[in-house]
Amino acid sequence: MARAADVAAYLSRLETERGYSPHTIAGYRRDLTMLVSLHEQASRKQDWNTITDGHLRRWVAQLARQGLGPKSIARMLSAWRGFFDALADAGKVDINPVRTVRAPKPPRRLPKALSVDQAMQLVAEPEPDGGDTRLERIRDQAIIELLYSSGLRLSELTSLDVAYVHGGRAGYRSLSWLDQDAAEVTVQGKGGKKRSVPVGGPAMAALHAWCRVRRDWLLQHPEREIPALFITRRGTRLCNRSVQLRIKQLAIRRSSSASVHPHVLRHSFASHLLQSSGDLRAVQELLGHANISTTQIYTALDFQRLAAVYDAAHPRARRRE
């Protein structure tokens, strides 16, 4: 079918020309498959020009009634908008009908961040825990220290190599890596954008300890050759889901909170750094945000903290009964 072929060609361009990750490509595929399905229900014609902004508004209303949230609808419209732009460039449509369609406004939600005391409790040096191997204890401590020290995304953390590798087995080349001498990590973030982020002293100490354990494990298993910084007991790269589960378990053991996940540590990093420095632009660079408006949400967290201090300390803050 012509519609499916156009979608496949567009996804291929996103992957090869823009370097989008498999996860992002999968999201675009779901959104564009929905567009094709809605188009098929509305018209038997394969021509994309038959889609109008009226169709799109009805479809958005239909999806909202079915329970799709404002954020998901906005993401879907963004995928459709980019797709129609590509069709317009190829001369397959006269105009982009998505340009005049707006998604419902989502409720503003502040990111969840730990207090400084909670963060310190979470990254505290662990006692030997039953059920965990020494490798797991030291590795998990390095992970949680690095997430809080450098504000990495989960995918950036798990893609880290122990050092920069170029020209290894099958021409492998590192996309993200640790530089122990410079005490920094270089990561490839969203849209293939690279950035270097410093690593604090406690995090580097935890990473040095982990690298020693990792090296000893590899010496005992010379058949394994893996560039990944964080590995499992079987010598494979640690996956995103495993990191999420390990951090959740650590949070329960150390702070009795089951709701801590890797992105909470990223939010905490940004919030605490902004509280101390007041430098929004620097926080934007360290987080790898393309637009400073994305970073500005942490100013609301900072105000929220100040308001809580005021309410707790000032005698006139609250009406006393």
Image (cartoon, helix red, strand yellow):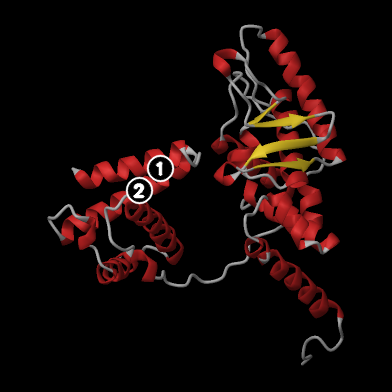
Query: Is residue 75 depicted above or below 57 in this figure?
Result: above
Depth order, front residue of 17/181: 17
Q: Nearer the viewer, residue 157 or 33?
A: 33
Question: Which residue is the site of mark 1?
Answer: 26
Question: Residue 306 placed where, x, y %?
Answer: 79, 73
How far apart marks 1 and 2 lie (CA) works out to: 6 Å
- Look at label 1 and name its amino acid: Ala
Quadrant in which the N terminus is drawn = top left
Q: Are marks 1 and 2 in contact (CB under 8 Å)?
A: yes
Query: Whole-percent x and y of residue 165?
Result: 67, 21
Query: Which residue corresponds to mark 2?
Result: 30
245 vs 100: above or below = above
Q: Secondary structure at mark 2?
A: helix
In the foreground, 287 or 135: 287
Left or right placement of residue 111 versus residue 116 in this view = left
**Quick one: quadrant of the C terminus?**
bottom right
Tell me the residue at 61%/24% (across/down). 173
Disc 1 secondary structure class: helix
* Residue 268 falls in image quadrant: bottom right
| Label number found at residue 180 | none
Kind of residue sitting beneath label 2: Arg
Regarding residue 135, the answer to whether it shows in the image is: yes
Nearer to the camera, 85 or 62? 85
121 w.r.t. 58: above or below: above
Toward the left, the furthest residue is: 44
Residue 256 in view in this figure: no
What is the quadrant of residue 9 in the picture?
top left
| Residue that appears at 63% across and 21% down | 233
- Identify the residue at image location x=44%, y=58%: 75
| Vertical arrangement, residue 100 with respect to residue 37, above or below | below
Q: Where on the picture, by quarter, is residue 216?
A: top right
